[in-house]
Amino acid sequence: VRLSEPSGLVWNYITEPEIDFALLPDNSFFLSLIFTLATPYLSRDDNSFYIIDNPIVRDKVYRLPMVRPSSWKGNLYSALWQMGYEQQNSLSMRRIFGQAHGQDNEEGFNQAGRLFLFPTFFQKTGLEIINPHDRSRRVGKNPILYESVLSNEKGCFSFLYIPFDRIGEDEQETCRQM
């Protein structure tokens, strides 16, 4: 299924964000990577009124399939944790990802992390079919449709790192923390 895409200027803006570094504090950086899906991407939207039971997450305005920034952040956090990097309460993880709600710090307030992620948009969607089988008869019944982003689709993963809590502090310590 081919979606109608926004005009070229709008498509470039939403798929590959640009950052004006003149407006940002020193030691901020932006990373943007274009990737190609090796397998279809599945997600679950909150939309309860859709033609199939398992729609993919879509942007509210252009209805483009997307990966939410919160999904990227959660997956990145989980990957670091599984690789054995510092635990949730460590200072470096709180600096990067922020503090969970209800988690107190020395000052007694919640603080955002230094990492800001952007959504990833795609253009093509398709359907994946799962067909559960009856174990005794070994026959499929009631196929389940899942909307997906097709494999070989390109997307852009982007994030912005801003050490806003280090503005006016020691430059060497800020660089060390980066």
Image: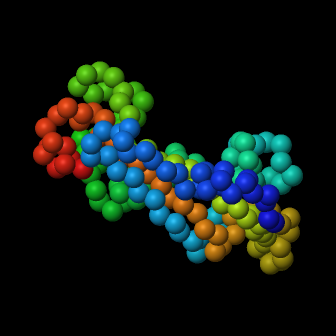
x then y, percent, for residue 96: 33, 45
Locate residue 24 relative to residue 55 in the image: left or right.
left
Q: Which colour style is shown? A: rainbow
Taking the image as shown, residue 134 lies to the left or right of residue 77, namely: right
- Residue reaching furthest to the bottom: 138
Name which quarter of the figure residue 5 lies in: bottom right
Q: Residue at x 53, y 68 (%)?
A: 35
Q: Is residue 96 visible?
A: no
In the picture as drawn, the residue positioned furthest to the top comes out as 108
Residues 81 and 98: in front is 98
Q: Which of the 4 image quadrants contains residue 170?
A: top left
Q: Position of residue 9 (x, y in %)?
A: 65, 53
Residue occupying the point 12% across, 46% down: 172
Residue 46 lies, in percent from the top left, at 71, 43
Q: Horizontal placement of 175 versus 130: left or right?
A: left
Could you tell me which residue is drawn at 33 percent across and 62 percent down?
83
Can you say whether 140 is above or below 56 in the image?
below
Residues 60 and 17: in front is 17
Q: Residue 100 location, x and y as percent?
A: 40, 35
User: Going by the image, does 111 lie left or right of 57?
Assistant: left
- Most foreground residue, 142 or 116: 116
Quarter where residue 108 is shown: top left
Please name the residue shown 46% across and 59% down the image.
32
In the rendered view of the protein, which quadrant contains the N terminus?
A: bottom right
Task: Tally the numbered discs.
Answer: 0
Is residue 98 among the parts visible in the rendering? yes
